[in-house]
Amino acid sequence: MSESSKGESPKAGGSEGFTVSRRTFLALSAGTAAVVAAHYAIKWPKFSPKSAPQQGTKGVQTETWVYTSCLNCRARCAINVRVVNGKAVRILGNPNSTYTDGKTCPRSHIGLQVLYDPERTKTPLKRTGAKGRGEDPKWQPISWQAALDEISGKLATISGEPNRLLVLQGLNTESDEHLIRRFAQAYGTRNLFSEDNLETGAEKEGRRLADGRDNSGYELESVDHTFTHYILAFSASIVESEGPLTRNLRLWGKIRREEPNRAKVVVIDPRYSITAAKADEWIPNNPGTDGTLAMAIAYVIISEGLYDQDFTDNWTYGFEDYKKTVLENFRPEDVADKAGVAADVIRRIAREFARSKPAIAWSGMGATSWPHGTYASHAIYCLNALVGSMDARGGIIYQEPPPYRDMPVISGAEPGIDFRETANLILHNAVDVIIGFNSNLIMSLPETKAEASIWDAPLKKPYYVHIAPSLTEMADYADIVLPACTYLEEWGYETAPPGSGYAEVRIKRPTVEPLYDSRPTAQIIFDLATRTGSTVKDAFKNIGDSPEGFVRYRTAAFWDTLEADGVWGGPDYHYGKYNQIFHTDSKKFEFHSANLTELLDVKFVGNEGYPLKLVTYHPVLHIKNGSQNYPWAQEIFLVMHGYGWDNFVEMNTETAHHLGIDDRDRVWIQSDVDGTTRRIKARARVFEGMLPGVVAVAVGQGHYASGKWDKDIGVNPNEIIGLDYDAVSGQPSFFNTRVKVYKA
Amino acid sequence: MAHWGMVIDLDKCVGCQACSLACKSENNVPFGSPDEQRRRLDIFWHKVIAASKGEYPNATTEIIPMPCMHCEHPSCVSVCPAKATYQREDGIVMQNFRRCIGCKYCIVACPYGARSFNYKEQENEEYQRPDLPPDLGLSFETYIGPWPYPHRTHGVVEKCTFCFHRIDQGLKQGKRIGIDVVPACVEACPTVARAFGDLDDPKSNVSQLLASRDSLKLRPEFGTEPKVVYLPR
């Protein structure tokens, strides 16, 4: 113990200072088991943020708390904002939300810096300079009137061929998304790309194959307080990057320590994520083998008769074929080498998983962003059906839709295209006008490295309208920029994402007046609609006429509750509705086994001589709105490494030793896809939490636009990733690029 | 007199850092910059650290939220030549910005790295928000605590106060500390991993939590007797 008493203060990383405490941890943990039962009687304190003890503050003329909702990721949680003297100063959870239990995740606090970001666009802008990355745009301020007239003029020129319009949808308030969708449909274009498909396209498609639904989710706590007892996370960092984050965080606390049977969490991931660090077991696997492992686990469950026979007999279709595929191809001993996980570990995990009900098999982006991603998602999802977790307490639920008032029916097909179609439209110059609603697509696209970007030239051609609060990287291609206001200045409504089963709607309302000359996105769409031909104009009649009116119109059935409480909760969820929940042709849960053997063929792109595999991940403080210009998020960006304001090429000690690289060295990370080499320079982070042969880079950094706190900070790994797609859903395959790393 | 303490359950905590952000926003703690972080000059009243040990694939990382430990025997108080840092009767270790001479002895003496030196210029607008602390009726002449935060002082040492302003005002209003009123980090914790209350009261939630499980204090060999106690996994 004496060596550490001379240790430095633990502030900067703290491993030295912690040595002794760590031993204490070990010594004490032996006694922990005995007291597990005892803690159950003790209630954690409950307190209401309403009683925040700040009334009577000196210098306060006006103080209000405003219920609204967050928009720093797609979970859109209910929040409560303190507004003092007309300025938003604090964000807490809305205590009326049972979905989040009145809590919020760390990202919600960043909202203040989203609102008061000094880089926000102040007025509509028109480009008078050249387009493209690194060009001088020579922005010229113009009036809203002139900007909207110019855009509607452009739309008129292609009204004969409406599919020449592409609409990009980044992270927007849900009510705005409904308006954007309606605008596209009324205009007549089917080309609307929603950017959440970049991350979830394959996962959703794999589940849709099984149940024909889009709204399935993991319910860690049921409405009658049954808790999930076992979570098998396939490259899913549940408490870091998986949504709905706040709910996951709150329920993590509950399933671990607030109910008698502490849930067991097993994380299968080549990277030691925060979830892996906090889980009971971390099983590093070879990248891209999550689907294979799921099938091997199914092998054990089926061959040992551990599956829910009642469910498979009565409510599934194709089980016999699936069983045959599993038993013929996925014996744990046969796939162990491929997956990098020992057969006895697979067998043990499978037995635990099948015997600890309710259990959930959770697929993450690292499991599904592959050419075989849809099949991997399907294979993982099928595990839930095997152990009887479909539509069960603490298992998989189908989120109920809120009773929004329907808008008048308009003609035309529902717009919506996948990423592959979007990429082809852009790369083959098949669109003339692009409207981006809070889109920063360029940061998520593969092969964007400046001098070798396949996107730079094609994106310069169409007329691009950038509608967003700030000049993010996509503004490099904009002809016109419209300053939309942030989510803390606008009206809207948000639906809770799948997770609770019962529906929840959150209100969005202005906490402060829109700053500068910015306007709410909904207002911009209404204004555009009135200028864009009679079909579009008519589609926006009688739906409320204004952003606030639209919210009141859509939520008429429960407006009073929504306005008073900030949230509206639907009736309790009912389980086991097997005769109505499956929307497949057979009206049953379908096992699609035809393509599952493709899981065994993990395809990589790039030079085969490159020895390493690049994986990426979304750290918790990666804000999902296309910007990272938020100092609070930046300074604590990577908690696992104790650093902010940067990201790293993370690698195992063994890999680093082999390459002659030391911790914090500057290194190049290089890919070679179809004869084009791309490389980015970053610092190496050498540690034990990584599968040898794999390097990981966090996304969220590498911005090169205007931000004072995000420009030229860290690197964007997507710049060197090879363009490849999931075969079925067209989602980009972010995880299968070969790279090499060498000292800079 | 109550003896305030905090209990942090490391089994529930997942290092999301909502606590650190709530602290920044509650106490108007300035944010740093890449340069300040490189030079370790950025100011944190609360920080989440990670400590790793072991080798792949059996490596483990403990993620530990670190407020000020508000030690029973605070070494920072012993070393302060200006009597600027002191312990209140209720055990909270405070910093008087008007007495502090910026010598940083306390930063060196603190075994937990809980203290930061404010190099920021007063006129730096980035941390002047109108989120004022409550009116505690304190007199500039007689009160020797840290002066409320919108008025920051350049060249002094700062640290976590257990959100003393919330506690003091809550007591005045007859609220239950630990239930109705808690520090900002406790309020913000989405996993409900933190609890705050009176360590001397066997019925308080912190005392009951400590009775329910084994617990540990960081760096016990220093004899500082921290009042932030951790429940291991």
Image (tube, rainbow, N blue to C red):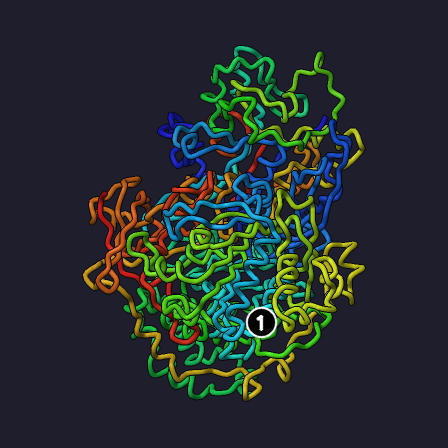
- Which quarter of the image is occupied by the C terminus of chain A? top left
Q: Say which of A565 and A446 sits in front.
A: A446
Look at the picture and state if B38 lies above or below B147: below
| Residue at (36% x, 71% y) in the render | A371
Position of residue A644 measured from the top left corner of the image (x, y, whole percent) = 43, 40
- Which quarter of the image is occupied by the N terminus of chain A? top left
| Residue at (44% x, 45% y) in the render | A138
- Kind of residue indicated by mark 1: Tyr
Position of residue A63 measured from the top left corner of the image (x, y, whole percent) = 75, 37
Q: Say which of A359 and A699 sits in front.
A: A699
In the rendered image, which quarter is residue B199 located in? top right
Please say whether residue A277 is visible from this viewpoint: no
- Report how many numbered discs are placed on residues in the image: 1
Position of residue B179 measured from the top left corner of the image (x, y, whole percent) = 72, 41
Viewed as shown, does residue A440 lie left or right of A549? left
Please say whether residue A461 is visible from this viewpoint: yes
Q: Say which of A219 and A467 sits in front.
A: A467
Residue carrying label 1: A187
| Residue at (73% x, 27% y) in the render | A59
Look at the picture and state if B142 lies above or below B136: above
Q: Say which of A73 and A696 sits in front.
A: A73
Q: SS at mark 1?
A: helix
In the rendered image, which quarter is residue A320 located in? bottom left
Q: Residues within 10 Å of mark 1 (few under 14, many from 20)?
A: many
| Residue at (54% x, 72% y) in the render | A159
Position of residue A626 measured from the top left corner of the image (x, y, whole percent) = 49, 52
